[in-house]
Image (cartoon, helix red, strand yellow):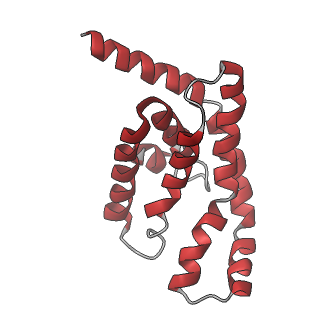
Amino acid sequence: MFCSKIVMEALPNIHLLGMLTIAYTVVFRVKALIPIYVYVMLNGIFAGFSAWWVPYLYIWTVLWGITMLLPKKMPRLLCLIVYPTICALHGLFFGVLYAPVQALMFHFSFEQTLAWISAGLVFDVLHFFGNLAAGLLIVPTIALLEKLVKKKQTS
C-alpha cells in the first residue's frame, strides 16, 4: 500500500489505497486492518507524525468498516458495481471525513469547517474519479488474492 502511494504521488489524490483496502477487506476481513495500519504507520514514519496524519488513524477504517458491512457473497456483477462505487464515494467524501479532526485541532467554527471542505472539493472530485478508476481493479485483485491464499493453503 505504501509503495503504491509513493509511486503514484505525482498524481493528485490518485492512488490504489481505496482499492487495496477494499480488496484486502473482502479477502482477509478483520486481518485487513494489519496492512491498513502498517500503511498508516509507515506514512507517519516517512512523512512525519503531524496534524495531516491524525485523520489517517480512522479514515481508512471507515472504508474497511463499510466493506465489512457488505454481504460476504455478492454476485460478481454486483461486485463490479458496488466495490468501485464505494471506493469512489470514499474519495469524494475524503475531505468531509478529514474535516472533524481539522476542526478540533485548529479550533474551526462550523463555517470555517465548511469553508475548509469546500476549498478541497476540487481535489475530492479528482479523488472520486481516481478511486473509481482504481475501483475497477478491485474484483480482479480479489480473485488474485484468493488464488494466492488458496495456493498457499494447499502447499
Could you tell me how many numbered marks the image carries?
A: 0
Q: Which image quadrant is residue 53 in?
A: bottom left
In which quadrant is the C terminus drawn?
Answer: top left
Front residue (pair 30, 118): 30
Q: Residue at x 71, y 40 (%)?
A: 85
In which quadrant is the N terminus drawn?
Answer: top left
The spot of residue 52 in percent (x, y) is 48, 71
Residue farthest to the top, as pictured: 154
The spot of residue 16 in percent (x, y) is 54, 42
Q: In the figure, is residue 136 to the left or right of 45? A: right
Q: In the figure, is residue 41 to the left or right of 15? A: left
Q: In the figure, is residue 76 to the left or right of 144? A: right
Q: Is residue 77 above or below residue 41?
A: above
Q: Residue at x 51, y 25 (%)?
A: 142
Q: Residue at x 36, y 71 (%)?
A: 49
Front residue (pair 100, 94): 100
Front residue (pair 104, 44): 104
Front residue (pair 12, 112): 112
Residue farthest to the left, as pictured: 155
Q: Is residue 105 above or below residue 151?
A: below
The spot of residue 36 in percent (x, y) is 41, 48
The spot of residue 139 in percent (x, y) is 59, 25
Q: Which image quadrant is residue 35 in?
A: top left
Q: Is residue 38 above or below residue 75?
A: below
